[in-house]
Image: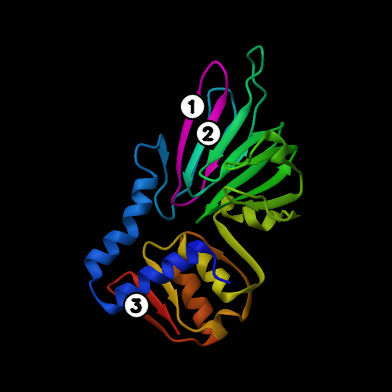
Amino acid sequence: SVRPAAAGARSCALALLLGGAPLVWWGCRAQVWRDGFGADYLTAVGERRDLVLEDGSQVEMNTDSALDVRYDAGQRLLRLYRGEIYLRTAADRREPPRPFLVRTEQGLMRALGTAFSVRREGAETVLAVYEGAVQVRPEGAASAADGRVIEAGQRVRFDRQRIGPVESASEAALAWRQGWLSFYRRPLAEVLDELARYYPGRILLLDDALGRQLVSGSFRSDDPEAALKSLQAVLGYRQQILFGRLVVIR
C-alpha cells in the first residue's frame, strides 16, 4: 500500500509529467506552505534546528517542520503543523505543575516525564517513545478512555479516529539528529520517500517492482543527491531529472 504522503507526491509528480508544470507545482507546494503559515518556528527542507523552551524543555526540529509553542497558566502546549520533532521534557517549576502537551491534526499527546519524537505523515501522526511514557488521544475519540499510554521503546501511528498497533521504536529512526539517514533492509520505495523529505523538489518512482528491492545503508541527510547517485550505482536503475527539481526513477 502507498502511504498518504507518498501518494500525494506521486499524484503531483504525475501531473507535472502530463503538463502544466508551473501551476501544478504551485498547487503541490501550496498546502505545505499553508500548514506552516504563522508558525512560531520553521525549518526549511534539509534544515535542522534546536530549541530550548522557557521551562528548560529541549526540542529538535527536523527538515521542513512547522511548530507553535504556547505556554500559559494552565498548560505547556506545542502544536506540530508538519514535519518532525524530538523532545526531552523538563519538570515544570510552577505549582501546580502544568501538563506538557503536543497536538497535531490527528490528536493530543501528553508527556509523562519523557523523551519522544512526533512526526506528521499525511493523515497520520507517528509517535515514538524513548524514555518515560506518553498518553495519546485521537482527535475523534469520544472520551479520554479511548486514549492509550505508550511506553518507552514503543512506537504507534494514529489518525483522527484510532490508534494503530504498537511497534518497537528504533533508535536508528533518530539518526537524523546527527545528520544521517540509516536504513536496514528497507524497500527502496520507503527509502526514497524518506530522502524526499530532504530533497528540495520531488522524487517519483515509476517501477513498483524496483520499489520492493531491499536497501541497507547510511546517507548524509544534507546531501540527498549523493544518496540517489549511490542507490543508482548499486541498483542500476534509470534516473532522469525534469524541470531541475523532479527526479524520475524507473
Q: Position of residue 38 (x, y in %)?
A: 35, 37
Q: Position of residue 151 (x, y in %)?
A: 77, 43
The residue beneath circle 2 is 78
- Residue type indicated by callout 2: Leu
The mark that comes first in sequence, 3 or 1, is: 1
- Residue type indicated by callout 1: Arg
The quarter in which the C terminus is drawn is bottom left
Against 54, residue 225 (above or below) is below
Does 70 lie within the magenta span?
Answer: yes
Residue at the spot 66% in from the left edge and 11% down from the top edge: 95
Q: For numbered disc 3, what is the local secondary structure?
A: strand
Residue at the spot 54% in from the left edge and 55% down from the top edge: 179
Of marks 3 and 1, the one in the foreground: 1
Where are the magenta residues, as a range? 60-78
Residue at the spot 49% in from the left edge and 86% down from the top edge: 237
| Numbered tag placed on residue 70 in the rendering | 1
The mark that comes first in sequence, 1 or 2, is: 1
Q: Quadrant of residue 249?
A: bottom left
Q: Quadrant of residue 186?
A: bottom right
Residue at the spot 25% in from the left edge and 76% down from the top edge: 19
- Mark 1–mark 2 Cα distance, whole angstroms, equals 6 Å
Q: Residues within 10 Å of mark 3 (few under 14, many from 20)?
A: few
| Numbered tag placed on residue 141 in the rendering | none
The residue beneath circle 3 is 241
- Residue type indicated by callout 3: Ile
**Left or right: where 129 falls relative to 81:** right
Q: Residues within 10 Å of mark 2 (few under 14, many from 20)?
A: some
> Does the rendering let one see residue 223?
no
- Mark 3–mark 1 Cα distance, whole angstroms, equals 42 Å
> Does the rendering let one see residue 188?
yes
